Image (cartoon, rainbow, N blue to C red):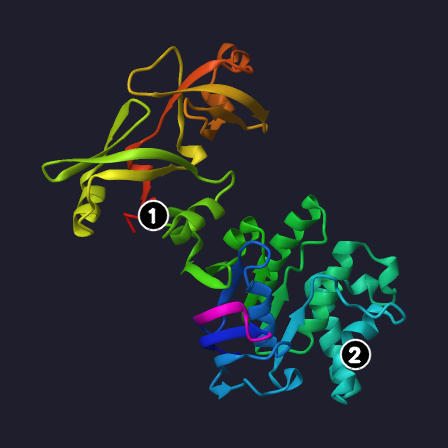
Amino acid sequence: MASLKLEHVKKLYDKNVVAVHDFNLEIKDKEFIVFVGPSGCGKSTTLRMIAGLEDISEGTLTIGNRVVNDVEPKDRDIAMVFQNYALYPHITVYENMAFSLRLRKMDNEEVHRRVCEAAEILGITQYLARKPKALSGGQRQRVAIGRAIVREPQVFLMDEPLSNLDAKLRNQMRAEIILLRKRIDTTFIYVTHDQTEAMTLGDRIVIMKDGYIQQVGTPQEVFETPKNLFVAGFIGSPQMNFLKAKLVKNSDRYAAELYGIRVELDEKRSAKLRAKNAQPGQVILGVRPEHAQLRFDGAANAIEGTLRVNEMMGSELHLHVDLNDDTRVILRIPTLDLTEEQRAGLTYGSKLWFTFPEKVTHLFDPETEESLLF
């Protein structure tokens, strides 16, 4: 098993295209790290540099106590699972899983032991004699993971391994990866564009944008204390609502004024704003859809909006609401919180009002887009 350290790692193409900028990260032994971000953010490029499939333009990569910048991929003691499975179609599942071990000229008994153990862990023992074309997508992905497991590497690298699966199977495989991690207990680096996968799988999440790290933290940290507008909008589904507001100060306490209401900030938030010497002026106020509280009949100190879309999600409603400045917000309202009459009244064009607890608000600088609170 091994820790990893990336120090000032940079990837350039053709000297003027920078895919990854000054990437610094230390990964602990047996940690499950997830790189997440939109397409083109540099997450897969970073993973491929760790694997040795891309050269490192600048910086240092250390696995264990060894600098591996110039070490061949086969000598880094890592195993990689790809998005497209990359199985050999003409040989059986057993031989696919045994292939890398046979290249090492490993003893046949040891090969058999490792393949059978990995197959049992993944629940694919009954498929060992089949060829990949006789398997479903989920079964093929298990084989690809099994082929990595048999190598017993220091580090597992996974590059969007579930993106080719349908939603139901993706959920099932996500749970299986969590169980797999507990059974083999090694270092994982997992790349995805799906923030749900990142939140459920990772011990820590590395959120990337345009080749830069935006924030590193536990799933709870990046959800509750996003450092900037990008992280706040990327983590959470539906994404955080952003509202134009005015920050005001009375003595040593702060408040936010927006859409005709005033939100008094608690002492904890006021103290953080005082520490940053925040000045009154325009800010962006963020509130997550699940923190909205629906009000009816023109409730006092509530924001008024016009309902445009009502999505029935089973246990909750997703209400798409237009405010008076063409800002659209999404409210997640549990269906059990509403009477049948109230649900029936939530139709296109109807007026509604909502509030939110001040303790769940986020504030961002409209120019730097950095959080004023964290």
Q: Sequence-wise, which precedes: disc 2 or disc 1?
A: 2
Q: What residue type is labelled 1?
A: Glu
Q: Left of 354 or right of it: where is 101?
A: right
Which secondary structure class fits the magenta region best?
strand
Tell me: residue 83, above or below residue 88: above
Q: In this view, does 71 lie to the left or right of 250?
A: right
Q: Where is residue 175 in the image (x, y as percent from the top left)?
A: 61, 53
Q: Is residue 136 above or below residue 315?
A: below
Residue at position x 82%, y 68% from top?
Answer: 93
Residue 19 lies in the magenta-colored region: yes
Residue 367 numbered mark, or none: 1
Residue, disc 2: 99
Question: Local crowd at mark 1 within 10 Å, few (<14), some, or many (≥20)?
Answer: few
Q: Nearer the viewer, residue 181 or 73?
A: 73
Quarter of the image holding residue 49? bottom right
* Residue 359 visible, this angle: yes
For the residues marked 2 and 1, what is the alpha-carbon distance in whole angstroms? Answer: 55 Å
Q: In this view, does 295 lie above or below 367?
A: above
